[in-house]
Amino acid sequence: MAVRKVTDLHKPADIVAVADYTLIPQLLVPNYTDFYVLFATNEIVIAFTDQSKYADEINSDNWYEIPARPDVKFGFSDPNQDPWWI
């Protein structure tokens, strides 16, 4: 749902975090982002564009601090809506 809010509803997001990282290259690259980072073993991703707040500052040392800034908007998915497999 987080990805669809960006792609279908055109809601701006500085960061999109999803449980299924494959959604980023499939649906967001190249029209909504050209960069994403896989940083967790359970497939959580942070995606942003060069127009996102602090895009020029975020790096591998401070990435976790950026979403905590009060002026950063981010979207996250509903775990009940995330893809899952048995």
Image: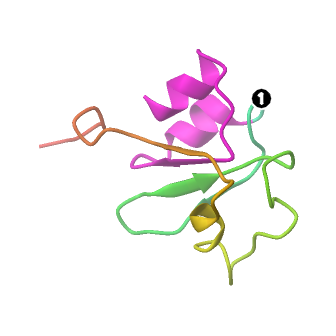
Examine the image and state in which quarter residue 67 appears: bottom right
- The quadrant of the picture occupied by the C terminus is top left
Location of residue 43 by image quarter: bottom left
Q: Which residue is mark 1?
A: 31
Give the structural element (helix, strand or loop) at label 1: loop
Q: State yes or no: residue 17 in magenta.
A: yes
Q: Is residue 32 left or right of residue 84?
A: right
Q: Residue at x 64, y 25 (%)?
A: 11
Residue 15 image point, x, y percent:
63, 49
Q: Is residue 38 magenta?
A: no
Q: Amino acid at mark 1?
A: Asn
Q: Nearer the viewer, residue 7 or 53?
A: 53
Query: In the visual, does 72 lie left or right of 4?
Result: right
User: What's the magenta region?
Assistant: 1-29
Q: Quadrant of the N terminus?
A: top left
Q: Position of residue 60 (x, y in %)?
A: 69, 78
Q: Position of residue 38 (x, y in %)?
A: 55, 62
Residue 79 in picture, x, y percent from top left: 26, 42
* Residue drawn where x is 59% and y is 15% of the image: 8
Of all residues, the one furthest to the front in this rendering is 70
Q: Image check: 47 left or right of 3?
A: right
- Name the residue: 74% across, 52% down: 35
